[in-house]
Image: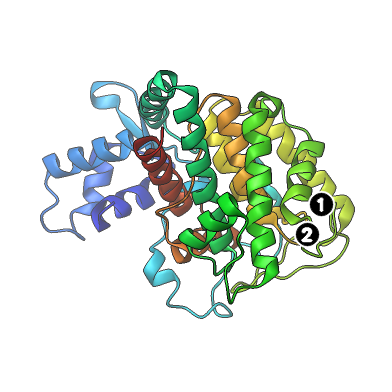
Amino acid sequence: MNDRQQAILDFIKQKQSANRQEIQDFITPHFNKASRITIIRDLDTLEKNGKIKKTGTNRAVRYKYSASPLLDIIDVDKYFVEDQDRRKLVSDYFNFDIWDNLHDLLTSKEKSDLALVNEKYLESRAKMSSALLKKELERITIELAWKSSQIEGNTYSLLDTEHLIKGGVEAKGKTHAEAVMILNHKKAIEYVFAKPKDFAKLTLRKIEDLHRILVDGLDVKFGMRDHKVGITSTKYRPLDNIHQIKDALEQLVKILNSTKNPIEKAMIAVLMISYIQPFEDGNKRTSRILANALLLAYDYCPLSYRSVSEEEYKKAMLLFYEQNSAYYFKQIFIEQFKFAVDKYF
């Protein structure tokens, strides 16, 4: 959005409901070239993007704020100029109000557009021979294992990862733990690919099973944590009571099972597993593989995250931790979904 559209949105959000004349009376003194036609165009854009809803007809038309609170737009570059200790958070601790807002992360148009994109994936996959499909699954396994590990600080290159997964050759100058992390990704991804429909109905046990595969051999305790945990680069502190952590994870499972759209399911899974931090370590890894499991369960294309910058991915996570804003992550996720459909299968 441009500054004028943001101002319009803020005004409608503050008023809860406004007609075009009220909006124009507010905007015109602040933006010299905000003509009637310009305002109408801006309102159409905001409505198309799901930020506002138009009600009534003719002179009775009013505009209401309709976007999920989780989709508030934040200037990413400006936000991270501020030192982490000076940033004001929505809540320094887990925000229990977030449960009521985990819906409508996609507009109706976005859902239909992404479903059309996914049709390309389904058509391409259906035409593949078993040998070619096996090759593509191996390729996305390698690239997802590499990028997901890289986001967590693993220093293996993509070529190193390919040699490790295909030939069992550990890279020189790298730690054994880095190799284990990547090979655990391979096992978890293959586990999901083998039984994708198992994740159509999610359970707590299935999340824990994925986590167990991903952290096996890495000196990480299995099961839900029973102690405090800090997150680098933020003041946000997740839940530290094992009973609350279990309750939160069970609540997440209910929400994921009741969410209809597969891409919304997957986005909520990544964001909330990362936000709850139910495990001692390996939370974000688990969230990414779980999201792919949910996509595959409903015949949607899995993501490799290959082209995303790990820095931008981390910024998107921090914005969700600190401001409960999913807007930037949503952009990244949709871009990576389209990238996956275009580059694989």
Q: Nearer the viewer, residue 272 or 13?
A: 272
Q: Is residue 27 above or below residue 312?
A: above
Could you tell me residue 126's position as x and y percent? 43, 19
Could you tell me residue 316's position as x and y percent? 49, 58
Amino acid residing under circle 1 = Ile
Drawn side of residue 297 relative to residue 229, left or right: left
Q: Nearer the viewer, residue 84 or 116?
A: 116
Drawn side of residue 26 relative to residue 330, left or right: left
Disc 1: which residue = 245
User: Is the residue marked by circle 1 packed among few (<14), some (14-19), or many (20+) residues within 10 Å?
Assistant: many
Q: CA distance from mark 2 to mark 1?
A: 6 Å
Amino acid residing under circle 2 = Leu
Q: Secondary structure at mark 2?
A: loop
Whether residue 145 is visible, yes or no, is yes
Q: Are marks 2 and 1 in contact (CB under 8 Å)?
A: yes
Disc 2: which residue = 239
Q: Pick whichever of labels 2 and 1 is earlier in the sequence.
A: 2
Whether residue 274 is visible, yes or no, is no
